[in-house]
């Protein structure tokens, strides 16, 4: 069981790394890739007995909430960020999903003033948030 958890984490970190690069360069993600990884990780968790359906669905709720906010704000928050957060939730559950989002938000909040002062972003610029989700997820893994 423990070995499968390492495999799930490795798959998720690789997925987040690829999507972080794509989000940074193009400001979009592959929804087909995200849904495929989501289904694969959910199936792994079910087959191995790591999580049940309720745990997986509850883990996906924070991402669904972000997608809802995206629709309500006219894409001020990217729906791709919510989809990626749903993948994190399907892999690790609601606690991991919320903690990764909290870490990502904290890291972004610390970085934004520095990026503004350095002239890398402007006040109304859009930012790629998936690199922050990657950092947040790695933070969750390292902190336990």
Image (cartoon, grey):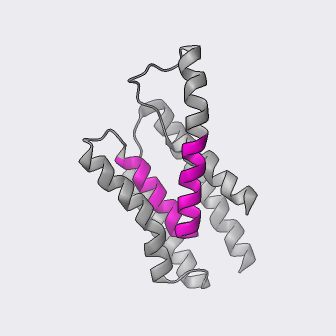
Residues rendered magenta in the picture: 79-106
Q: Main secondary structure of the magenta part?
A: helix
From where the camera sits, is residue 96 visible? Answer: yes
Asked if residue 93 lies in the magenta stretch, the reply is yes
Residue nearest the observer in this picture, 39 or 59: 59
- Residue 81 is one of the magenta-drawn residues: yes
Asked if residue 33 shows in the view, the reply is no
Q: Residue at x 51, y 65 (%)?
A: 89
Compared with residue 29, is residue 54 higher up or lower down, i.e. above or below? below
Q: Quadrant of the N terminus?
A: bottom right
Question: Residue 109: x and y, percent?
Answer: 56, 36
Q: Is residue 46 left or right of residue 13?
A: left
Q: Position of residue 71 (x, y in %)?
A: 26, 49
Q: Position of residue 85 (x, y in %)?
A: 47, 56
Count of labels shown?
0
Residue for point 42% across, 32% down: 26
In this view of the protein, which residue sits in the foreground, 136 or 47? 136
Residue at point 43%, 74% (across, down): 57
Q: Residue at x 75, y 56 (%)?
A: 142
- Position of the C terminus, as image quadrant, is bottom right
* Residue 83, placed above or below residue 107: below
26 sits left or right of 49 in the view: left
| Horizontal and vertical percent position of residue 107 | 61, 40
Image side of residue 99 versus residue 32, left or right: right
**93 and 91: which one is in front?**
93
């Amino acid at each position: 069981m423990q070995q499968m958890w390492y495999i799930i984490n490795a798959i998720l970190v690789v997925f987040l790394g690829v999507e972080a690069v794509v989000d940074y360069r193009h400001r979009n993600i592959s929804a087909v890739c995200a849904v495929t990884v989501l289904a694969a990780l959910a199936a792994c968790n079910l087959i191995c007995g790591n999580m049940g359906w309720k745990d997986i669905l509850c883990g996906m709720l924070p991402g669904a909430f972000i997608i809802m906010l995206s629709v309500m704000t006219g894409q001020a928050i990217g729906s791709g960020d919510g989809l990626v957060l749903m993948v994190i939730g399907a892999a690790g559950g609601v606690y991991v999903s919320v903690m990764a989002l909290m870490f990502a938000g904290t890291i972004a909040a610390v970085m934004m003033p520095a990026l503004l002062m350095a002239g890398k972003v402007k006040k109304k610029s859009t930012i790629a948030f998936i690199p922050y989700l990657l950092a947040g997820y790695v933070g969750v893994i390292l902190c336990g």
